[in-house]
Structure formats: C-alpha cells, structure tokens
Image (cartoon, rainbow, N blue to C red):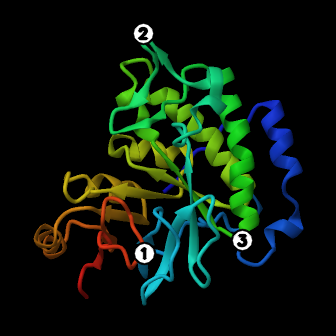
Amino acid sequence: MQRPAVLALGPLLALVAAGCSSPDDDASPGRAPSPAAASDGASFAPPPSGGFDYQLGGPYDPPDGTEIVVRDSTAEPADGAYGVCYVNGFQSQPGESEDWGDLLLTGDDGPVADPDWPDEFLLDTSIEVNREAIAGRLIAVVEGCADAGYEAVEYDNLDSFLRSEGLLTPDDNLALARLLIEAAHGAGLAAGQKNAPELADAGAAAGFDFAVTEECGVFDECADYLAAYGVVLDVEYTGVAEFGELCESGVLPPQAVRRDVGLSTPGSSEYVFERCPG
C-alpha cells in the first residue's frame, strides 16, 4: 500500500532519535535496517506466514512452529524468532501513573482510568506539546527494544479515545501515532498498530507496518485489518468450540492464536495455547 510520509518529530525528538542510531546499528544482528535506509523501500513487517505467540504474561520457550513472538518491553526477545516488543503507547502501565504527571488525561473526577484496567490511566494526546513529550519519553523504551534485539514494536491502546469520556479524538491519537511510528522506524524497528479497527486504514496511512488485534474474529473485525495490512497478528480469548468455528469459517487472519486472558505461562492451570489446524 502506498503510504504518505510520516510527520517530522519536534526538534528535541529528532535530536534524540538521530543520536540513538548509526549505520552500524542498522546492520547489527537481530535488527532490521530502518525503512529510511532501505534502498527498495521494502516493509520490515513480520513475516506473513509462520506460527505466532503472544507472551505478555511472561516469557517461555515458544511452541514448535513459532516464528513470531510478542513479549513485553521488559523481557528479552525469544531466540530464533522474529521479536515484537510490546509498548503501552497511549496509557500508563500499571503502577506507573505517577511517573506521567501532567501528561495524564484529566476529567472532572481526576485522571481518566481505563474501565477494564483501572490501574492504567489514559495519556493526554489532545495537544501537540503533550504528544511530543509522550513520544520523547517513549523513545527510550523503543531504543531499549532495539538494543535488546527486537525487530518490531507494537503500540497498545491506539483506541484509548473510546475510553476518554469524549476528551480525546481519533485524530489526537493518530497524531501521536505518527511520532511513535517515526521513533520505531528511526530505531530500525517495524511499528505495529494495536486494535482500533475503525482506524486500520488511517493507521496504515500514518505508517504502521502491521497490526496486532485482540478478538477480531469474535467481534467480526478481521476483514477491516486485513484490508489495510498484509500482516495481522490476532489473539482470540474465546472457548475451544467457538475458536474452532472461527477457524473453519476462514474469517481469521492466517496468523491467529487462541490464548487465555491472563496470557499465562506453561505450567499454569490457566494456560491456553491453540492455533487453527492446517
């Protein structure tokens, strides 16, 4: 898909990004060269085939046939797999809300929390100075992902505007997304959109290279992502029977997996891992 150029970072962000990379960095093992350095303009999205695993609950040896593994930014990437680094791009991580200070979105009752994850608070993307400050802080996390050997980053909660009590708009979040995408590309990493099917086309136009989705099959959203992206990594949390039906229906992306909601590790009684047959 033809995509417009990404908006330039502010002066401070540009200086930080430029100072964190070099031609030798782009050539280092385990890291894809940055899209800006590619002579053919090729995408550095994850491979469009091969098994996928979502390991945010803790790292473990990937199941056989796994070629793509998503892990939290605090974990090392999986050996021998294409590594995607999880970064919470639009909300605070649990226990870290105080670190964000005035960059938290504030409503009538104080900082606005995610109703489903009340220990996560929305970041205020409504004005440019905030967006640049948020991106400036997350550059260090993105660079840490690159230094650890990851090849891509997924930015969670692009859809935070839906939980913002009307204080944020899709355009607010897309403006921050452009800065975060540039930060990832500047570090030699592909950038993944997380959720927000209504913004799939706009996300691809902003420069996202692939998508990570949760339950696009259950909510009949997979086609929206697949129309915008060549690579869609989908996690379903449904039961065995419904997952089987989704697999048989053909609506799921080729790289879909069934996991438990807690994304637990093998050995836990809650652990679930399943791929569509074939």
User: Residue drawn 78% across and 37% down?
Assistant: 13
The numbered disc on residue 31 is 3
Say which mark, if any, is on residue 133.
Answer: none
Placement of 163 over or under 154, stated as above or below: above
Q: Is residue 145 above or below residue 30?
A: above
State the SS at label 3. Answer: loop
Which numbered disc covers residue 108? 2
107 with respect to 98 (left or right): left
174 relative position to 41: left or right: left
> Percent x, y for residue 159?
40, 38
The three-letter amino acid code for the residue at tag 1 is: Phe
Q: Is 221 on the left-hand or right-hand side of 78?
A: left
| Quarter of the view holding residue 123 | top right
Residue 244 coordinates in the image, percent (x, y):
15, 75
Would you call the spot at circle 3 few (<14 residues within 10 Å), some (14-19), or many (20 or more)? Answer: many
Residue 29 vertical position relative to residue 209 in the rendered view, above or below: below
Q: Earlier in the sequence, mark 1 or mark 3?
A: 3
Residue on which disc 1 sits: 52
Q: Is residue 14 left or right of residue 214?
A: right
| Earlier-in-chain disc, 2 versus 1 | 1
Q: Quadrant of residue 86?
A: bottom right
Can residue 250 be seen here?
Answer: yes
- Mark 3 belongs to which amino acid? Arg
Residue at 75%, 48% (x, y): give it: 140
Res. 124 image quadrant = top right
Q: Nearer the viewer, residue 245 or 249?
A: 245
Sooner in the amino-acid sequence: mark 3 or mark 2: 3
